[in-house]
Amino acid sequence: MKQLIPIAIVGAGNMGGGMLMRLRQLGWALGVHDTDAQAQRKAVSLGAMDCGSALQAAQHLSDDGVLLVAVVDAAQTEAVLWGENGAAPALKPGQTVMLCPTLGPATVEGQAERLALQGVDVIDAPMSGGPLRAQDGSMSLMVACSDPVWQRSQELLHALSQRVFRVGTRAGDGARTKLVNNLLAAVNLAGAAEAMALAERLGLDPAGTLSVIEASSGQSWIGSDRMRRALVGDFAPRAHVSLLAKDTGLAVQAADEVAFDPILGRLARDAFAQAVQQGWAELDDAALLQLMRQR
């Protein structure tokens, strides 16, 4: 008889891996599937059940189990659920899919509608805070789901995060909230990188200037976090440039759909697009400092 698991995670990279570590530390039984062999081995070494596909991960879920999707974008989410060896055919009424990537609202709505035809619920739950915060449970979760799903998911949600924000019942509202957050994060990061590049050009000590900013009105969490690394040349990826390039594009698209013109958001989107064009897509987004130094 196969072992039943209450949670399966598809996508054990930076954020998915952090959540997996968190749940394992709290004693949760987990299945895991990741197309990256190294990520899969690490997850299995932590005690997760090795699943050879998203389909197999879904097949091992209990009747009230949750499939937690922690991949990068809409295309990967589609593949996880509906592609070859995708999870959807094995999902049953009473089970839940938790969507954690940053997606466009229409993508979330579409997935929720398709899964509802099978009696499968969706938790729209994008996350923010980075891998270390995912590991220690201090990341933010922006949750939209129905009242019954919210009630029965409390233990899981609060195991994953000490900062769970219920932003609505409508599928897509988690995505909308995350896009608003990430657009502001991108604007703050672009501004911090520009300020540090200007400090250098003015002949100031950039690290000392950043210390002043951190104690003054120009402070932002993402500016401090990224610029401290950038100033010592540390661009090892924690959050790739490509992610904020994608997210700012989605945010500006969402703004266009409601006839709102995000002036600073467009500038931030263009800055991240330029960084991708420079070949820095896989670097940490702290690499935006390099772009500003070229101005």
Image (spheres, grey):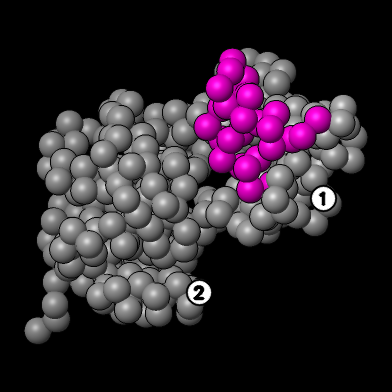
Estimate the x, y position of residue 134 in percent, counting from the top left.
37, 50
- Residue found at x 35% / y 72%: 43
When asked about the image quadrant of residue 216, the answer is top right
What's drawn in magenta, residue-wise?
Answer: 204-230
- Residue found at x 21% / y 72%: 60
In this rendered view, identify the residue nearer to me: 213 or 250: 213
Mark 1 sits on what residue? 277
Indicate the secondary structure of the residue bearing disc 1: helix
Q: Say few, some or many: other residues with alpha carbon within 10 Å of mark 2 (under 14 / 14 to 19 / 20 or more).
A: few
In this rendered view, identify the residue nearer to me: 170 or 217: 217
Image position of 294 (left or right of 260): right
Q: CA distance from mark 1 to mark 2?
A: 25 Å
In the image, residue 180 sits, relative to residue 250, either above or below, namely above
Count of all numbered marks drawn on residues in the image: 2
Estimate the x, y position of residue 223 in percent, counting from the top left.
61, 33
Estimate the x, y position of residue 178 in percent, counting from the top left.
47, 33
Q: Main secondary structure of the magenta part?
A: helix
Nearest to N terminus: mark 1 or mark 2: 2
Mark 2 sits on what residue? 36
When asked about the image quadrant of residue 7, the answer is bottom left
Residue type at mark 2 is: Asp
Q: Which mark is residue 78?
A: none
Q: Is residue 38 magenta?
A: no
Image position of 255 (left or right of 128): right
Quarter placement of the N terminus: bottom left
In the image, residue 6 sits, relative to residue 99, either above or below, namely below
Quarter placement of the C terminus: top right
Indicate the secondary structure of the residue bearing disc 2: loop
Q: Residue furthest left?
A: 1
Q: Is residue 218 magenta?
A: yes
- Residue found at x 21% / y 42%: 158
Residue type at mark 1 is: Gln
